[in-house]
């Protein structure tokens, strides 16, 4: 692969060029690094089997660790998942866009292969204008933190390029991450449990779902 194209976003013109370059690379089946509201992410077309496999290979991960999917709109959730409980929708209403990832039963008609998902999909809508701008042009993206497995997640473009520059086509450089902490992951396929505590605390989550008769437990 040729040298990575690292694009600044200091002006509106630079931002537009960077977003379009990233979206074009995704449409070609290539990998890109984009900023999110948590950490930088490595992204691939969620519906391209080859691109998702390349993403896992780039991180040094196997199919047993499928990537989550980022979306640009709450309405996309029902296109990707079924059987969404009302308490999960309440979390979406409160925390999307934001650092909340929901694990749900995926639509069986989806023609994708994210790995060994056991019929589930992890979905998040990031609170980041650049990420949303790319997603609006590409549709759902398989996105994982921009790092090699076992290394800290990249919180700036330098770290992402150092670890993944040989594997990606475009890096959208938006400076240091605003969040720096990964999303909180909630399993909504059953009674409700927290798989990973991150930017959202258990108390914040339960303040939303307990009035609906649900109490989440931390099994991270």
Image: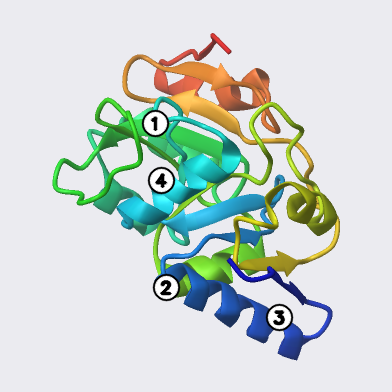
Residue 190 % position (x, y): 32, 17
**Which residue in the protein does label 2 denote?**
28
**Do labels 2 and 4 touch, CB within 8 Å?**
no
> Where residue 61 sits: x, y (%)?
52, 32
Q: CB under 8 Å between callouts 1 and 4?
A: no
Please name the residue that numbered disc 3 is placed on: 15
* Residue underneath mark 1: 63
**Residue drawn where x is 51% and y is 73% of the image:** 25
Q: Residue furthest bottom?
A: 13
Judge left or right: residue 148 versus residue 80.
right
User: Which residue is rendered at x = 72% and y = 46% of the image?
Assistant: 39
Q: Secondary structure at mark 1?
A: loop
Quadrant holding the C terminus = top right
Answer with mark 3 or mark 2, whichever residue precedes in sequence.
3
Percent coordinates x, y for residue 144 in the rendering: 56, 43
Q: Which residue is mark 4?
A: 53
* Separation of marks 1 and 4 at Cα, in angstroms: 8 Å
Residue lying farthest to the left in this orientation = 109
């Amino acid at each position: 692969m040729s040298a990575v194209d690292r694009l600044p976003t200091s002006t509106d013109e630079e931002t537009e060029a960077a977003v379009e370059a990233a979206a074009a690379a995704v449409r070609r089946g290539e990998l890109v690094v984009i900023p999110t509201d948590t950490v930088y992410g490595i992204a691939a077309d969620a519906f391209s089997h080859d691109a998702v496999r390349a993403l896992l290979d780039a991180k040094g991960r196997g199919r047993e660790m499928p990537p989550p999917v980022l979306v640009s709109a709450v309405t996309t959730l029902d296109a990707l998942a079924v059987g969404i409980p009302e308490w999960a929708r309440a979390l979406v209403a409160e925390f999307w866009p934001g650092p909340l990832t929901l694990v749900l039963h995926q639509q069986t008609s989806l023609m994708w292969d994210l790995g060994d998902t056991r019929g589930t999909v992890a979905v998040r809508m990031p609170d980041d204008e650049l990420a949303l701008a790319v997603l609006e042009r590409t549709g759902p993206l398989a996105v994982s933190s921009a790092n090699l497995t076992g290394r800290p997640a990249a919180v700036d473009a330098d770290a992402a390029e150092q670890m993944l520059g040989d594997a990606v086509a475009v890096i959208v450089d938006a400076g240091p991450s605003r969040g720096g902490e990964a999303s909180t992951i909630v399993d909504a396929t059953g009674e409700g449990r927290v798989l990973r505590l991150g930017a959202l605390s258990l108390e914040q989550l339960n303040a939303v779902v307990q009035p609906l008769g649900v109490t989440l437990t931390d099994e991270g």
